Image: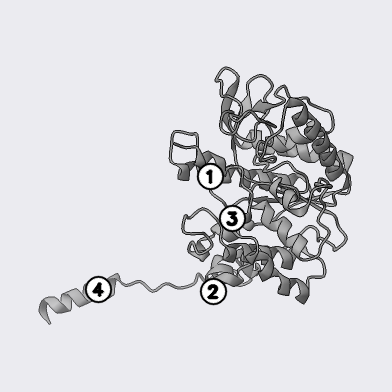
Amino acid sequence: MGDDGRNLGLLLKSLAVKTRPADRDETSSSPYKGLPAHQFWRRSISTVEPHRIDPVTQTRFKIGRNAQVGTAGSCFAQHISRRIMASGFNYLVTETGEGFDEQARVANNYGVFSARYGNIYTTVQLLQLFEEAFGERVPLDRAWIRPDGRFIDPYRQQVEPPGFADEDAVLADRSRHLAAVRRLFEDTDIFVFTLGLTEAWRSRRDGSVFSAAPGVVGGAFDDTEHEFVNFDVAQTYDALSRFLEKLHVINPGVKVLLTVSPIPLIATYEPRSVLVSTTYSKSVLRVAAEMAIREFDWVDYFPSYEIITGSFSGGLYYQPDWREVNALGVSHAMRCFMNNYIEGRGSTATDIAPEAVRSASASDIVCDEEIMDSVRI
């Protein structure tokens, strides 16, 4: 055989037969043995049809038909409120726009959330709203003037599109608003809050966070009075935990459901790619939500963020701009929400869901953040 024989002999010599150690305990097993399928990627994601994936494995509470549900947060939170209303559950609205016709109510942002606060993107905004509503803080900025001579509320700059006639009108409306916020926090059984952003603009004088940067909708930017801030995990969670503690004092029976918005930032003030800033922001918010459910047993987390952004969907749940969530994505997230959190979930809710989604297109969602893109030039 010559060289071929020698080579074959070397090959056979190099082969090793692996055998099980004779002294191995046959009863031992990996700590992962026997765990449920949802704890393994291949079993719960890879082998499941994308539209059937449901990452909710357990819930701390259910939402009964008579439970009063309040909502606040970023743009995506509106999908949850719409689904609750469309399914016949008790959606709590304490600022209804009584006295306005339906067209005026819609035009002036009544019923978008439980109270007319517009988008509340950061946990610091949520905390300062609670403290102001219950007399724990009085912000220094009271009203800003727009270029057209009308006035706006610095903390909800776009809730009144026509603007207010003067500063007194702003303050009178804010007083009514804060009364509605108090009723919301005192009466809600389930409070759903969607964390949206970490970037914000605030007052150097008293630390108050504005709903948009001064000078975008109204007011005038002054770097001696205003500053940009990008909250970190500690700042975000500190505000969230303080809010939760205060809420539980005035409403001991309340349950809170946290979500993180899957919608990327429309713009970043950080000198880097908006994609990088989006990853930072959502990571901070997700960690803060996780910290909350570990500290408070009456707080839960719904993974709408994971459902929409998960790699299993292949980007199918976004509009062509890769930012807005489309009806298909909303439907998937809300189906998981209804199936897991709604008490007595039945065929009625299943039948009504698609209609509710189709009627809530991206153009119907009120998003204060959009103003930053419209004035970028």
Q: Nearer the viewer, mark 1 or mark 2?
A: 1
Furthest toward the top, the residue is: 224
List the residue tagged with mark 2. 47
**What secondary structure is found at the residue carrying circle 4?**
helix
Q: Earlier in the sequence, mark 3 or mark 2?
A: 2
* Along the line of sight, the residue nearer the viewer: 308 or 74: 74
Q: Nearer the viewer, mark 4 or mark 3?
A: 3
Specify the quadrant of the image occupied by residue 220: top right
Amino acid identity at mark 1: Leu
Q: CA distance from mark 4 to mark 2?
A: 39 Å
Where is residue 214 shown, x and y percent of the image? 59, 28
Q: Earlier in the sequence, mark 3 or mark 1?
A: 1
Report the side of 6 relative to 313 (left or right). left
**What secondary structure is found at the residue carrying circle 3?**
helix
List the residue tagged with mark 4. 11
Q: Residue at x 89, y 45 (%)?
A: 252
Classify the position of the N terminus by image quarter. bottom left
Q: Earlier in the sequence, mark 1 or mark 4?
A: 4
Could one spot residue 104 in this view of the protein? yes
